């Protein structure tokens, strides 16, 4: 039984250019996650806006996925090649070769993990494809993080406990590192020592998707879901408190996007393309992991077949013997 674990940032995706768009559509989650206190009136507006923002978020996920699937100009928020790899993994999961797939990330915003999960699950058409999202503040990492606040590692014990104790996973107590495949652009030494060759340190995915392209998608989504821009604008003031661009006389989508842009450096140009997957060594490594788990499965299958073959063989022998008689 195999478990596939993926890091998020610079492994599956690069969220640099999309970050503020995402916050603005997941405002409630953001305020909750970072415990940002907001006024009574704004709380009221947020509740009012929430169903519209949820619709906008769902549409945003669909339109981003659509752009990612463009054969000539994929957006590149999701690392090119990852979606087809996930489809392959989904197939292996249905066959039982892979038991569970997780994201284990040091990103502190759960909605960032959720966004990548939503894109992937929209693509593979299964809403239970990823079993668990482990972000920085995951309840089972409390001990790991509070015992060493400056420690940014990921370790075997934490991962093992999560796999065993998460109700939707329930790995057996006998779980061994040989059943875990791990993909990360960073080298978490303790985990890497335990998992050995099944720790795949992939090359970091550094492409920062075109801000201009994202703006077009974002604007179309706000427009189509009839978001109250003034309300959204007022709530965004909590995230950009010192930004002079946030002028109430200019509460337009353009003004909102300008503030995002000011806080997002060096994104790709409109006509730039993300690196091709066939030239991406990180993708090659992930595919290698998949080949390895398939090979292992074939071997296990053969062991089972051998028993059957032996049986067949002996009946064949008997028949031959009986014929000789
Ligand atoms: Mg990373």
Image: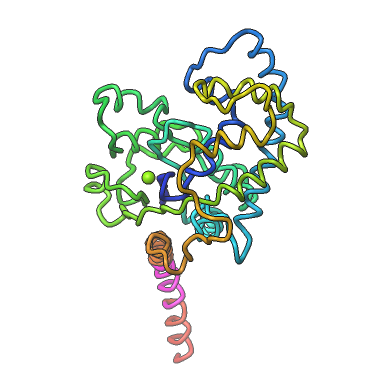
Quadrant position of residue 191: top left
Q: Is residue 5 above or below residue 50?
A: below
- Residue at point 35% right, 49% down? 184
Q: Position of residue 163 (x, y in %)?
A: 40, 37
Q: Is residue 100 visible?
A: no
Seen at 68% across and 34% down, the residue is: 253
Q: Position of residue 137 (x, y in %)?
A: 41, 27
Q: Residue at x 36, y 52 (%)?
A: 181
Q: Quadrant of the C terminus?
A: bottom left
Q: 301 or 32: nearer the eye?
A: 32
Image height of 64 relative to 283, above or below = above
Residue 273 in the image: x percent, y percent? 53, 61
Residue 223 visible in this rendered orientation of the protein: yes
Is 126 left, or right, of 112 in this rendering?
right
Residue 311 on the magenta span: yes
Tell me where residue 235 appears, x and y as whole percent: 61, 21
Residue numbers of the magenta segment = 302-313
Name the side, left or right, on which 190 lies relative to 205.
left
């Amino acid at each position: 039984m195999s478990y596939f674990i993926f890091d998020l940032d610079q492994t599956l995706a690069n969220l640099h250019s999309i970050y503020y768009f995402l916050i603005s559509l997941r405002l409630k989650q953001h305020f909750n996650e970072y415990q940002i206190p907001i006024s009574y009136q704004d709380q009221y507006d947020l509740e009012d806006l929430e169903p519209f923002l949820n619709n906008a978020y769902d549409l945003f996920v669909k339109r981003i996925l659509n752009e990612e699937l463009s054969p000539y100009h994929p957006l590149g928020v999701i690392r090119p090649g990852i979606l087809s790899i996930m489809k392959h993994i989904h197939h292996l999961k249905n066959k039982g070769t892979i038991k569970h797939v997780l994201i284990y990330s040091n990103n502190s915003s759960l909605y960032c993990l959720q966004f990548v999960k939503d894109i992937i699950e929209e693509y593979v058409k299964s809403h239970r494809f990823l079993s668990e999202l482990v972000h920085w503040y995951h309840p089972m990492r409390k001990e790991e993080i509070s015992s060493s606040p400056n420690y940014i590692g990921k370790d075997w014990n934490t991962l093992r406990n999560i796999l065993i104790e998460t109700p939707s996973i329930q790995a057996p107590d006998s779980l061994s590192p040989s059943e875990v495949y791990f993909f990360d652009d960073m080298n978490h030494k303790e985990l890497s020592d335990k998992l050995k060759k099944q720790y795949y340190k992939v090359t970091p995915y550094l492409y920062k998707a075109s801000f201009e392209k994202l703006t077009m998608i974002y604007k179309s989504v706000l427009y189509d879901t009839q978001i109250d821009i003034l309300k959204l604008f007022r709530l965004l003031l909590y995230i950009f408190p010192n930004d002079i661009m946030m002028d109430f006389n200019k509460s337009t989508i353009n003004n909102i996007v300008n503030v995002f842009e000011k806080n997002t450096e060096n994104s790709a140009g409109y006509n730039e393309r993300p690196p091709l997957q066939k030239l991406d060594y990180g993708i090659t490594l992930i595919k290698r992991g998949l080949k390895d788990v398939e090979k292992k499965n074939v071997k296990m299958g053969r062991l089972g077949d051998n028993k059957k073959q032996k049986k067949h063989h002996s009946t064949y022998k008997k028949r031959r013997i009986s014929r000789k008689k």
